[in-house]
Image: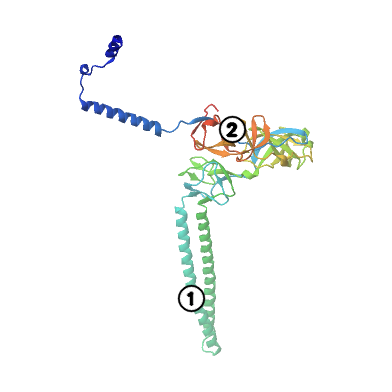
Amino acid sequence: MNDKSALLGQLKIDRDALPQKSGGAGKWVVLGLAIVAAAGGAWIWLRPAPAVPVKVAIALAPAAGGAAAGSVLDASGYVVARRQATVSSQVTGKVVSLTFEEGKPVNAGEVLARLDDTTAHAQLSLSLSQLDSARAGQAVVQAQLSDAERQLKRAKELHEKQLVSDAAVDTAQANFEGLTAQSERAQREVQVAQRNVELQQRNLDFTVIRAPFGGVITVKNAQIGEMISPLSAGGAGTRTGIGTLVDMDSLEIEVDVNENFINRVQPAQPVEATLNAYPDWKIPCKVIAVIPTADRSKATVKVRIGIELKDARILPDMGARVAFLSAGKPAAAAELPKGVFVPVQAVGKDAGADVVYVLKGETVERRAVSLGTLKRGELVQVTSGLTSGERVAVGDLAQLKDGVRVQLDPAQ
């Protein structure tokens, strides 16, 4: 018992032996520590959540199924646009505004650029003044002609009464005919002035450059401040056009077929095309025409092939391989599966529903989808909820939810 009391006595703190500190300093230390702790907690609470690393996959439209007919001839070529133009102006001028960028779709008649119209406005004002002057001159001549007509009539009446001589009547007649000619000349001058006004108005309209047809701007050639001239060769800082406009609905494929096998190609023959960029995508096509001339240097004949399935992934100048199928047995374009295909890893479960996370800038959007029964390797069919070309996240889907920031894998 005494041993336990001794041990307990050793554990007691002798407060009299502790150094005494001023109470004020201790309070400031405690307050400072509290502020630091609060600031740290607020930073931890308010700091943005770290971005979740993900990979990106593109929802692909289904490729055409295998054709019932076999290929009778294979060839390679390029996607070309039958309708494209370098948009320019019909007058020389300095660019003062541009309303387009590369990749922007435009409608027919849409304003693409404006040129400096100061000189055109001045010339139009001058033409309007000349028109007003011509009309005033015509009015003067018309008044003189009316007076000459009255004098001629009076002279004839007096001549019938033998009150004036024949010479007086002849003079009045000559004066009337001269003023008639002047009136016709004044009328022609008014017409010339009107035509000049129309010409200057047209030159003013030419300072506004519009899209000749609907399409997509693929190349931007000019900038604000540069000179545009339809007659320039492009040197000395003067451009011949502001950009290249391509009608994406006019895309087709051109291939060169060896002349030894051109007998296997017929107009309207079914064709199955494959783009080099999408080797697993079979595109249903059809022969438009066989150009009736051969290239002597290459011993080939050019064939135009129409694309029956329009898609935003088909771009001008893409390389393509085509397989000419047996006539009368086209590829089954109508048998294309429904929806799109995405990697299996891009589809997750959330509250029992199939979901994907669609990329929207730096964040993702949760999207409920319906899955089909088809699978192609690592791809699964999505029948609804996604459209072709949309980007979906692939990664640890358990970390994702609607609005979460993501970071794309730089190695992808």
* Vertical order, 333 against 175 (above or below): above
Foreground of the two, 108 or 223: 108
**Residue 255 x/y as whole percent:** 70, 36
Residue sitting farthest toward the front: 1
Give the labeled residue for mark 1. 143
Which of the numbered marks, if any, corresponds to residue 206? none
Question: Amino acid under label 2?
Answer: Ala
Image: 202 above or below 164: above
Task: Determine which quarter of the picture holds residue 379.
Answer: top right
In front here: 399 or 272? Answer: 399
Q: Which mark is residue 346?
A: 2
Name the image quarter holding residue 129.
bottom left
Tell me where residue 395 sits by quadrant: top right
Return the x and y of residue 145 as percentages of the image width and height. Answer: 51, 76
The quadrant in which the C terminus is found is top right
For residue 320, side relative to residue 390 (left or right): right
- Local packing at callout 1 (Cα closer than 10 Å; few below 14, some 14-19, many 20+) is few
- Disc 1 residue type (three-letter): Ala
